[in-house]
Image: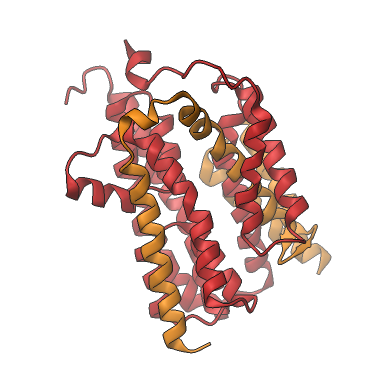
Chain colours: A orange, B red
Amino acid sequence: MSGTTLWIAVIAGSVGCYLLKLAGLSVPASWVEQRWVARVVDFVPAALLAALVAVQAFTSGQELVVDGRLAGLAVAAVALALRAPFIVVLVLAGAAGALVHVVTG
Amino acid sequence: MSTRGRDPARSATLRDAIGLGLAVGLYGAAFGAAADAAGLDLWQTVTLSALMFTGASQFALVGVLGAGGSALAAVGSALLLGTRNTVYGVRLVPLLRPHGVLPRLGTAHWVIDETTALAIAAPDRGLARLAFLAGGASIFLTWNLMTVVGALGAAALSGPALAALDAVVPAAFLALLWPRLRKGFPEAEAQRRVAAGGAVVALALTPFVPAGVQVIAAVVAVALAGRPGRAPRPTAEEEMA
């Protein structure tokens, strides 16, 4: 792919993502106060974040994969249950992932 | 703004925001490395982190390009993942109330998973603004700095370091999700059902849809929450009253 095509993707994607952010902030307050909007807004992030967790931990391209990321996720869950700070959770998860990589070669 | 009786809360808010910035910075290095591996040059990588500034969309864009997808598919995936920032913006309006064109344009750039989570978690509207601004500043700085480090240092990373970065990404999303599943969060039970549904839908669709699409499709899990007629939960100010 040419450098120009890549630049177009970078700029178009960036402008589009910015406009999506701006659109949310520009919605009239009366819309936000509607019950179904409030409901969607309360629940959509949980669905998306859980999907991102699943996809980032268990997939590689189109395939389902189990590897060191699962160990990292399990360690992160335990750390979160013990109310460890965010940075500690990430460091422990990273260490678990690296350990699995070293052990399994 | 009165800070009487709120100094410990302000300190805690700042500490959380800066801590989150440092943590997300680690993840910026992973993005720099991923962009380098996908064939983007340093300036394209740096431009993405500065202008797009929404991690999952950035990963989606370079992920599709790196997997041989078209530029159109790459941009499409980034935009699909970016739609949740629209939802976050809607959620943030009553908390941040950006009045005027410039504050709105400036605020929009920092509307991401982490700043939204910080603002929503804050105990009142003043602290929500502080959390959003401090978190946004801290994340923007470390994310861009570590993107450069990652892009330049990608070649030097060995196997275990890459495996560690791979494991950090899902853990970071889990940490963002976690408070919603805890007892005490409004409708935690329903939040847990939605989260489980989202994960299952995303994994089930992964073999069949283009990268990134399964994440958006997972919002059908919201339908599992039940009780459509519930009362809206009180705003931060009502809770303070």
B122 and B8: which one is in front?
B122
Instruction: Name the image quarter holding residue B54.
Output: bottom left
Instruction: Name the image quarter holding residue B131.
Output: top left
**Quadrant of the drawing holding the N terminus of chain B:** top left
Q: List x then y, in percent, for residue B24.
A: 47, 53
A98 and A41: which one is in front?
A41
Q: Is residue B48 above or below residue A68?
A: below
Q: Is residue B153 above or below residue B105?
A: below
Residue B101 relative to residue B241: left or right: left
Q: List x then y, in percent, for residue B29.
A: 50, 65
* Residue at (42% x, 32% y) in the render: B120
Q: List x then y, in percent, for residue A48.
A: 59, 45
Residue A87 relative to residue B22: left or right: right
Residue B185 relative to residue A32: left or right: right
* Residue at (55% x, 23% y) in the render: B185
* Residue at (54% x, 41% y) in the render: B176
Q: List x then y, in percent, for residue B229.
A: 56, 18
- Using the rendered image of the protein, determine whether residue A94 is visible from the camera's viewpoint: no
